[in-house]
Amino acid sequence: MTHAHHFLERLDRVNREQTEFALSLYRDHEAVAYVLSHVHLPEGAARVALSVDDPREGPFVLVTRDGRFVTCLGRGMHHDHPVVPRPQIDALLAKVAEKRARRELAQRELRPDEEEGDLFQRVFTRGSRLAREDFLAVSAFEPMLGFGPFMSMIDLGMDALKARAGMSIDGRNATVKGTTKKALEALDRMEWGVAHLAVLAGAAERRDLDAFLDKARSIKASATFACSAQGGSTFYLRGAWMAARFGKSVIPQYKAGFARSQDWMTALDAALGLGAIGIRHASAAGEVRRIFEAYGEKVEDPKNNDEMKGNMSHAMLDAMTREAEYLDAGIKMGRELAVRISGRLPVGHPLRFATLEDVPDGVARTAVLILDGDMFDPRVQQFALTAMPTAARAAAEDFYHPREIVRAWYGQWTPEEALQRLKRFIVGCAKATPVRAAPPPGRNDPCTCGSGRKWKKCHGTPGASAQPT
């Protein structure tokens, strides 16, 4: 008698609902293989007990380490095999279902003239117009991409920096000297390709993230600086999100990077990364707080590197302490952005939001995360600091609007978009703007709009504009 037959005959040991669950596992060998590959098992364990209900009393589905079904143990039938608890099984099965849904989406996304490999090219060709459907379709193949997205992000980030350095423009004028629309488009696609690869790499599973970090140990900068170095708020927020996905294991790297940083760009990348880790991982919050508390207090006008880091540390500590308020402020800023951007659409358009209250939270969240604000502007630095908790808590797809919004709000790409980003980078680097960003005011502080009223009675009230820029 084979193992499978023995298992099926022993299903009379469990009730109908438990039988249905056990049979769903039996019919789905791919899912069982995924579960077994994502749990820690003792090296010598030949069999594994999959808990159907109580992790101590059972019932259990007994399988071999390679996923063959052995038998079903009824409640109270004890054994000496390692147990995978039911909640853990359910969580892993949910991931399997999500991966399958993305593969189905990827198949629907394919045009008649495309193959599966062509989907990945959208990361490098669609720039800021990459839609959520595109990202989800590409992410369906993430397990097969391995180190590709992470290493490509670093390489492409360096290529973008070199390309910018090779372009000559007068930052005071809108004219382009020695460059063409094709060159600007190539630069734009490189910069946004870095942004998309950062999210794709950060969306990898835990064991893959750990493997990425082993690869990154030889890199002098942080694992996310290649993204942040593109200079826009969305790039910094993606870097912070990616650091939060890496988690506690990168705290020493970001701590050291913050300590040795000699410019605001590398310091802010490290500070946002540490803050995001502290917010996303409660077990890391204490360690992150101690790192920031070691720096000086906030000063009104930072004049040196240490004072700049002290201000950043103060802002990150405030964000961690008042996370809920920051999350609310992030959504408010997103609503304001959505109203402003969609206001270009004709009255009556379904994607035109007339008031802040009309904007769904999901649309507002993405509007904040996708904004390509000029980080050389202190107001945008404040915007990014305020939005950091939103990024830390985000899902990968939150960085992308659905296709219908992308088409309605943004239309066709123009070379002026890349030109403006190039100009602000050249002018901003020449000015070497220090970070003077401040967190949102306290509830009883004067409102930043200059009305003379308290924040809580003005722009700090529910539904009020947060004045992001």
Image (cartoon, rainbow, N blue to C red):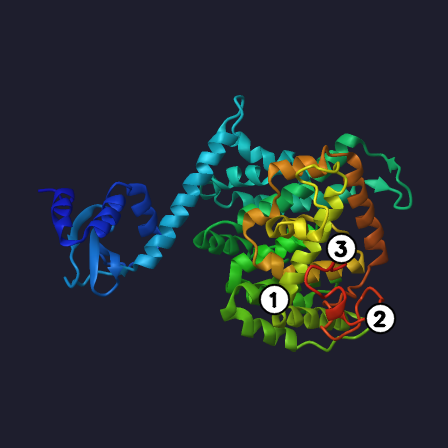
Helix, strand or loop under label 2: loop
Which x, y percent locates residue 43?
27, 58
Q: Where 461 falls versus 201 (above or below)?
A: below
Q: Tell me if 404 is positioned left or right of 139 in this view.
A: right
| Residue 77 occupies quadrant | bottom left
Q: How many marks?
A: 3
Q: Residue at x 30, y 60 (%)?
A: 85
Residue type, numbered disc 3: Met
Per the image, the residue denoted by label 1 is: 324
Marks 1 and 3, the one that precedes in the sequence: 1
Q: Amino acid at mark 2?
A: Gly
Quarter of the image where one finds residue 274: bottom right
In the rendered image, the residue lying farthest to the front is 348
Q: Nearer the viewer, residue 217 or 327?
A: 327
Quarter-wise, where is residue 111 in the image? top right
Separation of residues labelled 2 and 1 (CA atoms): 25 Å
